[in-house]
Amino acid sequence: MATLEIRDLHVAVEDKEILRGVNLTVRAGETHAIMGPNGSGKSTLAYAIAGHPKYDVTGGEVLLDGENVLDMTVDERARAGVFLAMQYPVEVPGVSVSNFLRTAVTAVRGEAPKLRDFSKEMRGAMAELQIDPAFAQRNLNEGFSGGEKKRHEILQLEMLKPKVAVLDETDSGLDIDALKVVSEGVNRFREGGETGVLLITHYTRILRYVKPDFVHVFASGRVVEEGGPELAELLESEGYEKFTKAGASA
Amino acid sequence: MGVETRPLSTLHERTSYDVADFPVPTGREEEWRFTPLRRLRDLHKGAEADGKVVVDVDAAPEVKVETVGRTDERVGKAYVPADRVSAQAYASFAQATLITVPKEVVATSPTVVTLRGEGGVAYGHTTVVLEPFAQATVVLDHIGTATYADNVEFVVGDGASLSVFSLQNWADDAVHLSHQHARLGRDAKFTSFTVSLGGDVVRIAPSVAYDAPGGDAELYGVYFVDKDQHIEHRLLVDHTTPNCRSRVDYRGALQDEGAHTVWIGDVIIRAEAEGTDTYELNRNLVLTDGTRVDSVPNLEILTGEVAGAGHASASGRLDDQHLFYLQARGIPHDVARRMVVRGFLGQLVDKITVPDIQEQVRTAIDKELDRGGASGAAGAAKQAVRGASDEPGATIEQELDR
């Protein structure tokens, strides 16, 4: 049973402190929503967990089942079971979706799946996400619409089956149909109850489809309020203003 | 300027069959300033031929292959040398290889010309003639070692179509300076693919001239430059007639100390060449410190009536965002790096229409990636996922086609 434990995490970007002591624990079977206004550090938290070189961890630790992922390289973190669905997936010219997915699956599982099994699995997962099979042969994210990119992030999530998924504003830029498809993918991923989800969002809309167990309000680089799903509803009606003030004065 | 005065191109090169018309280069000349003259083994100073490049032709059955003497009137018609080494090669070759595809004949297989260097200085000449409406694919495969200068002429007749692959698969110590000139008839189609991987100093100058409207030239190049290697491509597309088209796309990767590539892309659109459509592109991917890229596109437009004209040049390091994205999916750094480099060059390799050559080029690029100093450190990690990453992309795609 996987547990992701973030302890007193401090992160700076170009010497500017963005995260100022984040504490958060995601256990298997739990879905945590992190909500907060723009610039509150939500994405910084996501990238710092994944190990993006731009983000300097200046203090604290991130433990996956007791092991500090901050000591691992980016790819080691992914193989250990941390997945980041990115807000802005990167276009990689000349690398096909199928080749990329197979290489990633091979790396994460430790052995190359049989071609036939793999392509069947991939086709099945693509169909569930209503992705045109022709995308398998296209270059990774190249020329994809915003919605297509997000579906592919969830396709990767479903195929790589991590222990903990961090979804960084996966809902942004999606129309309602795409949002439902993507949410169903996230729900399939968590249905076994053995995986954890850290869902970062600016809006409450996705929480209607992906029900969180806990909601954390992020402001000025730390968690300023915690609660259950009812907190999201409060944010929906009252906005972030109260918390941004609290964060600034804290 | 008088009404009758036409603007002249500043890129126009002087041409002559006579070596004496070209002074010995000093390295300060525009056309020689990037080339390491000291490593040319005197090819630019009239080095005596004392070696051999053995030419072996495996021709399509429909194609006529001859070895002819210097005086054969079909040789040297299409191209007049434009620099000293080219003129030297023209003055010095003993025999020329002449390949003729008769009128309206469609060659059913590629004609493979293997040029095997057996050491020493050698000069050569190859002429490929496609008579009107003929179609053929010709491969020039350079292997072994030599200090070699040659001229290659491609005469593409009216309505004919020629695809050429020039593969520089030389041994590490070869020196090769070559001019490869195509002359296109009305509605002729010419596609060239230059793949430069081996050799110590390789300087290839592909050029295109149009004799009549409707000519279409596509010039592609892929290269991989290693430690202390000098690979130079100098392109000249001279649009002298209306309504012709040209596309140039050269892409290369460089790794390790002293790797140097030069790309010169000259395009002239003459006053009379109205309706010209041209675009040229050069991109370089720098994989380590200590490399050098010189990329110089020159577009000279002497008419106001063009259909399209553009150029672009970009050289840069591997994109950290690409690597981060792939690594964030568990792919080790070194494998991610290979995927990005392969993807970068692969977009051109995909255009190679002869499956054997495409596979050969892919394998050669992988070998280059293997020998790079930058990739050595993560060898163990690479092994871990070898199964998937080293499988050609086509395999999974074929499986998907079922």
Image (spheres, coloured by chain):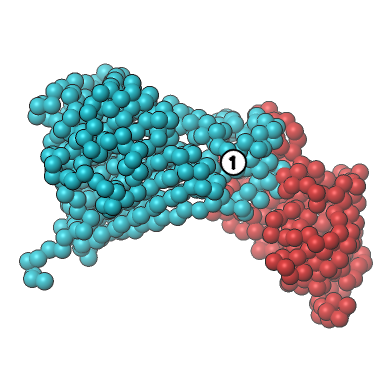
Chain colours: A red, B cyan
Figure check: B273 above or below B4: above
Which corner quadrant of the image does residue A169 belong to?
Answer: bottom right
Label total for image: 1
Which corner quadrant of the image does residue B355 belong to?
Answer: top left
Residue in the picture at 25% in, 39% down? B44
Q: Is residue A180 left or right of residue B134?
A: right
Which corner quadrant of the image does residue A61 belong to?
Answer: bottom right
Q: Give coordinates of residue B293: x percent, y percent.
A: 43, 50
Report the front residue among B355 and B270.
Answer: B270
Q: Is residue B318 left or right of residue A184?
A: left
Figure check: A221 above or below B373: below
Residue in the picture at 38% in, 24% down? B144
Q: Is residue B38 left or right of residue B227?
A: left
Q: Is the N terminus of chain B in the top left, top right, bottom left or bottom right quadrant?
A: bottom left
Q: Residues within 10 Å of mark 1 (few under 14, many from 20)?
A: some
Q: Is the C terminus of chain B in the top left, top right, bottom left or bottom right quadrant?
A: top right
Which chain does the residue under circle 1 lie in? B
Q: Give coordinates of residue B31: x percent, y percent.
A: 27, 49
Report the front residue among B196 and A134.
Answer: B196
Q: Which residue has dot 1 on it? A: B374
Figure check: A210 above or below A139: below
